[in-house]
Image (cartoon, helix red, strand yellow):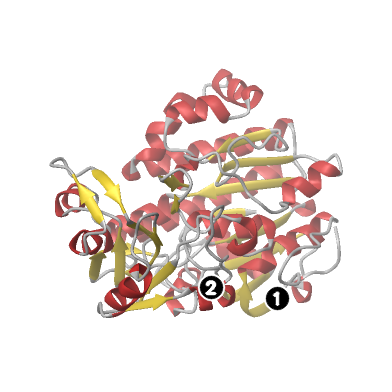
Amino acid sequence: MLSIDGLGAGYVDDPRLHLPALRGLAARGARARRLTCIFPTVTWPCHTSIVTGVSPARHGVVGNLTFDRGTGAVVEHYGDRTERGIEAETLWDRLHARGERTASLCWPKTRGVTTIPDNIPEFYEQELFERYASRPLWTELASHGLPVSRYGAWSAAHPLGPMQDWLTLEAARHVLAVRPPRLLLLHFLTLDSYQHDFGTASPEARWALLQMDALVGRLLDTLTALGRAETTAFMVFGDHGFADIQRTHHLNQILLEERLLEVDARGAVTRRLAWAAGNGGSAHVYALEGAPRTTIDRLRERFAALPGVDAIGRERFAELGLPQPGPGSTQGDLMVAAEDGTFFSGHATPEAAAASPVYVAGHGHMPHLPRLGAALVLAGAGVRAGVTLGDVSMLSLAPTAARLLGVELPGAEAPPLVEALAGSS
């Protein structure tokens, strides 16, 4: 299972791009017109749904950035900066229970997972790589001359993303050669980073996709050299598409105006009666202890008046696959969703916003927006050739992978893509 972060549905058919590896897989396998994502369409909830087959209401990862009412702390899922784990059964749980191996390289929400023997989670800090990466694998990679001491630096800086993805691929090639797993999870990030920084139609983003295709080709060549290409099933996908940004709303600055936040002279928050956790094209909004009872109603009205914004109350959470807010949940009391071209930040002051990177494209919006759809290609062992699927739910990926692996995910919320499968493998 290979995730190319930000691989929108339209990229694979772009005639200006030379993508021999991705198009070669599509030609000998099955592909979807569009992979529809869960909400919010951001990396950490999406990747969690991809390996569980369930929505955030059940797996508990409701955003890249959320808030813990109990501790009063911001929860950063991105970079796996939190101990909060996945609250649903995963593909690696099912395989481990059967005594089979999973390898996971740069996959979100794998921090501290002991049931993945060869595991390098997705982090930004070198300290976390050193602490949580599988020690035998980490030592082996270093002994083979791979610069694992640079994983953190290459992960944290977007311009160095191609080096991070190269290192992830080399780690995968090593694992395939010495301890072939039943399931290999890979995650490449450069395409996502370059779209954020330069835009979806930029030369930089197009170059990044060519690099991703080259890495896929090298992975296929490795499996061919190992004599395993014909017995391997490939599932290659994006976790979301992208929208270019014309307008940004700084929600916490509105909370300052409403006297629901206080900051000191340095811009640090000193008191919160409410908080907005921005997730790009969406945001969680929390009313906290001490806030007036009318806070959410007031904020819903205030945010709904912003251009390009839909304010969503808890009466719609279930249909969006979100849990109800409560003491043990990091779900907001209110969600705001942006139209295409609109973006949210969580910066509490103009100075904080000015000091942060400026994205020219983003995601996190409602999954029905056409440009938020992702690509999906299936090929190899157990996959029918020449199948064209329509719109496919992201929640179908885990049960489809489970069928190919010969296991079941009984809790999955969508059926496997049986029309694309030649049979169990």
Q: Residue at label 2?
A: 317
Q: Residue at label 1?
A: 386
**Other residues around mark 2 within 10 Å, as few (<14) / some (14–19) / many (≥20):** some
State the count of labels: 2
Based on the displayed image, in which of its 4 quarters is residue 115 positioned?
A: top right
- At numbered mark 2, what does the secondary structure look like: helix, strand or loop? loop
- The amino acid beneath tag 2 is Phe
Residue 415: x and y, percent?
Answer: 75, 72
Q: Nearer the viewer, residue 138 or 52?
A: 52
Q: Earlier in the sequence, mark 2 or mark 1?
A: 2
Q: Nearer the viewer, residue 383 or 224?
A: 383
- Side of 223 where 125 appears, left or right: left
- Side of 315 where 182 appears, left or right: right
- At numbered mark 1, what does the secondary structure look like: helix, strand or loop? loop
- Quarter of the image with the C terminus is bottom right
- Which residue shows up at 50% across the image and 51% down it? 214
- Side of 239 where 345 appears, left or right: left
Q: Nearer the viewer, residue 87 or 220?
A: 87
- Which residue shows up at 18% across the image and 47% down it? 355
- Which residue shows up at 63% across the image and 75% down it? 392
Give the vertical position of 212 relative to 315 (above or below): above
What's the CA distance linking mark 2 and mark 1?
Answer: 38 Å
